[in-house]
Amino acid sequence: MKLSMKEKKILYAFACPSHHNTVTRLKWLTALTIDPEAKRRMLGLARKMETEVDESWYEAFYHHLRMEMDEYRRLKRSLRVLKS
């Protein structure tokens, strides 16, 4: 499954190790979102997580995503320090 950086950031903020809880949370966030573009993006991500991600390997996917995004934020912070 291929995720955009925006989708990864949403999952980094709102996902948890439970596949069912993550999908449910994304659907609730979709219902609470006012902006039509953000609502479309959230619903698309919720559907993608529900259909394309198998529950049996979701936990490994979740931990890999957290590791990847932690590294991304660390490198972004280092780049900001170098620019100053």
Image (spheres, rainbow, N blue to C red):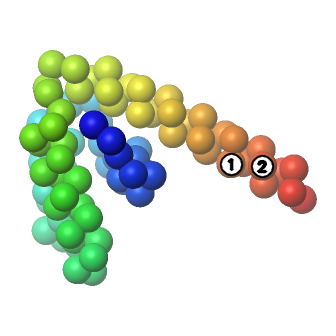
As drawn, 79 above or below 53? below
The residue indicated by pointer 1 is 76
As drawn, 36 above or below 17? below
Answer with the quarter of the image where residue 61 lies. top left
- Label 1 amino acid? Lys
Horizontally, residue 36 falls left or right of residue 8, namely left
Horizontally, residue 79 falls left or right of residue 24, namely right
Q: Give x and y (percent) for residue 39.
A: 22, 71
Q: Quadrant of the N terminus?
A: top left
User: Regarding mark 2 in the picture, which secondary structure is present there?
Assistant: helix
User: Regarding mark 1 in the picture, which secondary structure is present there?
Assistant: helix
- Label 2 amino acid? Leu
Q: Are marks 2 and 1 in contact (CB under 8 Å)?
A: yes
Q: Which mark is residue 79?
A: 2
Q: Residues within 10 Å of mark 2 (few under 14, many from 20)?
A: few
Residue drawn at (26%, 64%), measured in percent from left and top? 41
Residue drawn at (45%, 52%), measured in percent from left and top? 5
User: Farthest front residue?
Assistant: 2
User: Farthest bottom residue?
Assistant: 35
Q: Which mark is residue 31?
A: none
Question: How far is mark 2 from mark 1, CA to CA?
Answer: 5 Å
Q: Give x and y (percent) for residue 76.
A: 68, 48
Residue drawn at (17%, 61%), measured in percent from left and top? 43
